[in-house]
Amino acid sequence: MGNWRANGPKNSAISVLEAMERVNKNILVYESGPSLVNKSTYFQGELDINYSDTSGTNKAIRLASRSDVVVAVMGEHGLQSGEGRSRAKINLPGIQESF
């Protein structure tokens, strides 16, 4: 949800995975795939976007190939938007496009 979430009520947002787990009839299997960033981040720091580490990719693809439905949650990191953080291109950042 990024920076725009900062003033929202505490614990009012949940992840896509958490929301899907709350639906009783769902049988979920989960694999995270490659990470968008290479290290932990903070507001003032520059993001170290992952362009090469494919860790988790093979596991995620194998699981997806055995599944009826795949939900791939992708997009920019929360610190890639906001004041002074506009992007010139709207492509998926980092390794996500090849994934």
Image: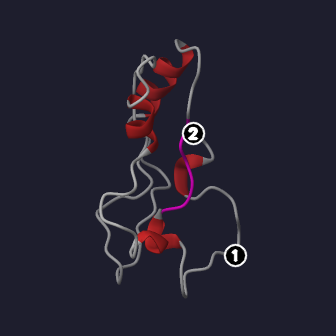
Above/below status of 82 relative to 23: below
Q: Picture quarter containing residue 68? A: top right
- Whether residue 62 appears in this view of the structure is yes
Quickly name the residue at label 1: 88
Residue 28 location in percent, x, y?
A: 42, 21
Residue 81 location in percent, x, y?
A: 54, 74
The residue range painted magenta reads: 72-77
- Whether residue 55 appears in this view of the structure is no
Q: Give the camera-side residue of 37 and 42.
A: 42
Query: Is the residue under label 1 in contact with that under label 2 (CB below 8 Å)?
Result: no
Q: Picture quarter containing residue 98? A: top right
Could you say whether the residue bearing mark 1 is in a helix, strand or loop?
A: loop
Could you say whether the residue bearing mark 2 is in a helix, strand or loop?
A: loop
For disc 1, the neighbor class at 10 Å (few under 14, some 14 to 19, many from 20) is: few
Above/below status of 63 relative to 76: above
Q: Amino acid at mark 2?
A: Phe
- Identify which residue is drawn at 48% across, 73% down: 4
Q: Amino acid at mark 1?
A: Ala
Quickly name the residue at label 2: 99
4 horizontally vs 41: left or right = right
Question: How far is the residue under mark 2 from the one under mark 1?
Answer: 21 Å
Q: Give the camera-side residue of 33 and 54.
A: 33
Above/below status of 73 relative to 57: below
* Residue 55 belongs to the span the image colors magenta: no
Q: Earlier in the sequence, mark 2 or mark 1?
A: 1
- Identify which residue is drawn at 61% across, 79% down: 86
- Main secondary-structure element of the magenta-colored stretch: loop
Q: Which mark is residue 34?
A: none
Residue 95 location in percent, x, y?
A: 53, 50
Colour pattern: secondary structure
